[in-house]
Amino acid sequence: MLAAQASMSAIEIQIGGFGGQGVILAGLTLGRGLALYEDYHVSLTQSFGPEARGSACSVQLIVSDAPILYPYLSRPDVLVTLSQEAFRRFAPQVREGGRLLVEETLVRPEGVRPDLRLWAVPATRLAEELGRKIVLNMVVVGFFAAVTGLLRPESARRAVSESVPLGTEALNLAAFEKGYACGVSRLAAAGAETAFRPLPLTGRS
Amino acid sequence: MKADPAGVLTGTHFLDGDQACCEGALAAGCRFAAGYPITPSTEIVERFAQRAPQVGGMFIQMEDELAASIAIQGAVWAGAKAFTVTSGPGFSLMMEHIGFAAMTETPCVVVDVQRGGPSTGLPTLPGQGDIMQARWGSHGDYEIIALVPSSPQECFELTLDAFNLAERYRVPALVLMDECVGHMTEKVVIPPAQEIEIVPRRYTARPPADYQPFEPGPDGVPEMVRAGDGYRIHVTGMTHDQRGYPEVSAEAQQRLVERLVAKIRGHAERIARVEETWTQDADIIVVAYGITARVALRGVEMARERGVAAGLLRPVVVWPFPEKRVRELAARARAFVVVEMNYGQVALEVERVVAGRAPTVLVPHAGGTVHPPEEILAAILAQAPAREVAR
């Protein structure tokens, strides 16, 4: 049933990187947490062209307290980049006053607009501490949860467990915790608050 | 009857439309799929190939779309519920066998995840250019049923409905998705099996001596048997008599084609389904379906914010076309604005049914992305009485 959106309050999120970095899985994990365990309306779209097979790829989420009618991103409120190419392509599109999250060893954030708030996470290093660089995407998911405040850590943890391949839950949850702790400490060090308070939701559990 | 719990993935999920479509088929009791995977429909059979063995089902990758679309019909006559999935170029190749299914009254489901066309077009981007092809693409006169989902949730629900309608009327039922709903991931709620109503195959209770495979019941639909159950059956794409034997005559042709058409047209108002938003007091009726209906609703909202009485009529079942409802609205609407990702297909139907009682305006789009809502708003405002438009 389509429903009209009476008072739309939506947040747009984009995650960009190289195909193979787990960008799409990071988006699906956040989307699952937001849609199933925070009860937001969430529409996720992803790149399906040749870019999804190795070059720059991205995933887009629209998160809203009302049914989502227009399915595509206009300008992201939060951009997460895991590659210099994604940063170069997508950073100019971020909405005024938006948040920019970067993987600090993979992205050199040059020329960041002064209206944007920049947060950097050493996701590769934190993942390597767990012995598996491949879980850097779940480090990023943890960091995102901490600095945006959009979803509760317990919602994100459930989503991580249900999104990653069977048998890898513990490793991925450990990666999530490293990213989350890093986000919490960097937020505190900057004396900052999370980017968002929860959207005003009707019937939110 | 209720759904077989084995195929029902009860719960709240985060699925794309393709995955949800696959779950709709499994919930409906579909246990056989044949396909020649093609973007953007591949994820449906990819999931089916993983899930089917868990529920006693089977997926076969065939050599092409002609083979896929006839293999499912073999499975149906052997007793299975079956479907195939495709997109643009593959849909064109399946036309021959969609006609065969209509002629042989083989209940089956064909899913077309529409992409930009013609020809190879835009494999990874949406289109809605196959609406008329779904209705008229095979040669000769026949009727089919086609459903158009607007969300992953509806990809689940309408695929399930397509299987039920196929069995109820013994026709090919088509699910006309588009790349956007197919590849978009949203929350999908799958109910418990005991809450899912399934239309079983209409098997005969008659003994073999009294049974003719194409003898129509009171509603025009014949009863079926399974090949190998001891009944004499003959299934042919040629014009046939009630025994199923070829009969090359004008009389047999008249009897058969008239019945194939009447069994759907005679039940058209029961099959037709629309969803309406703010149409009660609307001067301007916007008609849109699939992903476009969502964007069109945004345009309608923007028009309402400007004081223009616009409303949305969304065909959920596009074939048979919801003639009765469009005719009712035409009696009082000031204009119809048809928004579709093609250059005028459903707009022709609206125009035909409205029959000059109000102007019908097309807002076309060649595909590749959805309409900007502002474009839809502009088309609505252009039809609004001047006093209503508070710019």
Image (cartoon, coloured by chain):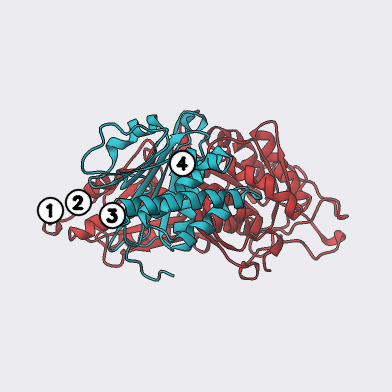
Chain colours: A cyan, B red
Which residue is at a point 26% across and 50% down the rendered structure image? B359
Mark before the other along the chain sequence, 3 or 4: 4
Q: Which residue type carries mark 3?
A: Gly
Badge 2 density bin: few <14, some 14–19, many ≥20, Cα 10 Å = many
The quadrant in which residue A56 appears is: top left
Q: Secondary structure at mark 2?
A: helix
Which residue is at a point 28% across and 54% down the rendered structure image? A191
- Between the residue at mark 2 and the residue at mark 4, the CA separation in whole angstroms equals 50 Å
**Residue underneath mark 4:** A123
Mark before the other along the chain sequence, 1 or 2: 2
- Between the residue at mark 1 and the residue at mark 3, the CA separation in whole angstroms equals 45 Å
Above or below, B260 relative to A128: below
- Between the residue at mark 1 and the residue at mark 2, the CA separation in whole angstroms equals 9 Å
B383 or A195: nearer the viewer: A195
**Residue underneath mark 3:** A191
The label nearer to you, 1 versus 2, is: 1
Does residue A36 appear anywhere in the picture? Answer: no
Above or below, B147 relative to B191: above
- Between the residue at mark 2 and the residue at mark 3, the CA separation in whole angstroms equals 49 Å
Q: Secondary structure at mark 4?
A: helix
Q: Which residue type carries mark 4?
A: Ala
The residue furthest front is A189
The label nearer to you, 2 versus 3, is: 3
Q: Secondary structure at mark 3?
A: loop
Q: Which residue type carries mark 2?
A: Leu
**Residue underneath mark 1:** B391
- Between the residue at mark 4 and the residue at mark 1, the CA separation in whole angstroms equals 50 Å
Above or below, B193 relative to B256: below
Badge 1 density bin: few <14, some 14–19, many ≥20, Cα 10 Å = few
Q: Which mark is residue A169?
A: none
- Between the residue at mark 3 and the residue at mark 4, the CA separation in whole angstroms equals 21 Å
**Residue underneath mark 2:** B381
